[in-house]
């Protein structure tokens, strides 16, 4: 086996194994935080995506949304980012001082695992076409199967089809279709349950009711019926 064949066989296996390690490897421990003499409000340990959107500052110390957090978890691969940014701006305008955090909502684990297999299939097709008939005896198949000759008859079309279909399948497996909105860790809207996006007025009313309920809980200690 020459170097080209070793590379074609080893690259897909390396990519697949590295993806498996990245899925099941626990995240690194967080560095210890340095405490200062002044007291500051602790922030929840949420990893948020960096967006090219300027953050609004609280208009006043006692703003209606001051101290509250809204988490918008959306499908980043579904082109929902524009809707999430629009909702973020609206909430920061309607509730001065509120902290709106945008984050990706990943698909279920089985779909993520299958999405890691797609590149292996793509590189496998490429490797079989480029390596030729000599690759089959190395894996215990003495006579190439009939479909191999069909692939070899139209090399460019076979490679392009495998690449395009693989990308479409991978995009489907990486999408969750989610647009979930949490206010102070309470789910106020779920696209997975409703099957639609929230309207701006609808989301404003839902967040307003949750903030009012949180205010009653903080001031009285019991939520009034």
Image (cartoon, grey):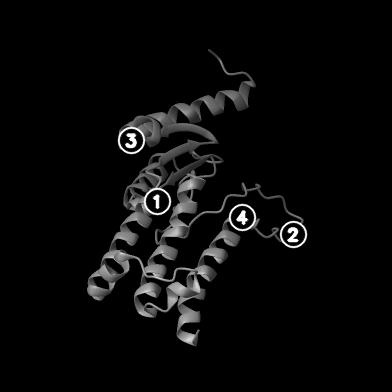
Task: Name the residue that disc number 1 marks.
Answer: 173
Residue 99 on image: x %, y %: 50, 46
Disc on the earlier residue, 4 or 3: 4
Q: CA distance from mark 3 to mark 1?
A: 24 Å
In the image, 133 versus 164, the foreground residue is 133
Disc on the earlier residue, 3 or 2: 2
Question: The residue tagged with tag 2: helix, strand or loop?
Answer: loop
Horizontal arrangement in the rendering, residue 116 relative to residue 165 (left or right): right
Q: Residue at x 37, y 48 (%)?
A: 84
Residue at the extreme front of the image, as rendered: 142
Q: Nearer the viewer, mark 4 or mark 2?
A: 4
Q: Residue at x 39, y 79 (%)?
A: 131
Question: The residue tagged with tag 1: helix, strand or loop?
Answer: helix
Find residue 203 and report its image quarter: top left
In the image, 67 versus 149, the foreground residue is 149
Q: Residues within 10 Å of mark 4 (few under 14, many from 20)?
A: few
Q: Nearer the viewer, mark 2 or mark 1?
A: 1
Q: How many marks?
A: 4
Disc on the earlier residue, 2 or 1: 2
Task: Name the residue that disc number 2 marks.
Answer: 32
Task: Name the residue that disc number 3 marks.
Answer: 198
Q: Are marks 4 and 2 in contact (CB under 8 Å)?
A: no
Task: Name the residue that disc number 4 marks.
Answer: 24
Q: Are marks 3 and 1 in contact (CB under 8 Å)?
A: no
Find residue 206 and report its image quarter: top left
Q: Residue at x 65, y 22 (%)?
A: 221
């Amino acid at each position: 086996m020459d170097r080209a064949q070793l590379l074609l066989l080893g690259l897909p296996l390396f990519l697949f194994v590295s993806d498996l390690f990245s899925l099941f490897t626990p995240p690194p421990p967080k560095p210890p935080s340095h405490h200062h003499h002044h007291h500051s409000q602790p922030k929840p340990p949420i990893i948020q995506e960096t967006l090219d959107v300027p953050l609004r500052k609280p208009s006043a110390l006692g703003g209606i949304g001051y101290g509250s957090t809204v988490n918008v978890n959306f499908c980043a691969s579904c082109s929902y980012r524009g809707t999430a940014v629009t909702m973020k701006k609206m909430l920061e305008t309607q509730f001065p001082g509120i902290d709106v955090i945008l984050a990706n909502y990943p698909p279920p684990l089985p779909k993520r695992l299958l999405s890691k297999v797609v590149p292996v299939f793509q590189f496998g097709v490429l490797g079989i076409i480029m390596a030729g008939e000599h690759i089959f005896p190395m894996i215990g198949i003495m006579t190439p199967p009939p479909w191999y000759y069909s692939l070899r008859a139209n090399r460019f079309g076979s490679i392009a089809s495998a690449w395009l279909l693989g990308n479409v399948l991978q995009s489907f497996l990486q999408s969750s279709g989610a647009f979930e909105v949490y206010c102070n860790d309470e789910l106020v809207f779920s696209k997975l349950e409703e099957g639609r996006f929230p309207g701006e007025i609808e989301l404003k009313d839902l967040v307003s009711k949750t903030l009012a309920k949180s205010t009653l809980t903080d001031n009285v200690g019991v939520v009034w019926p």
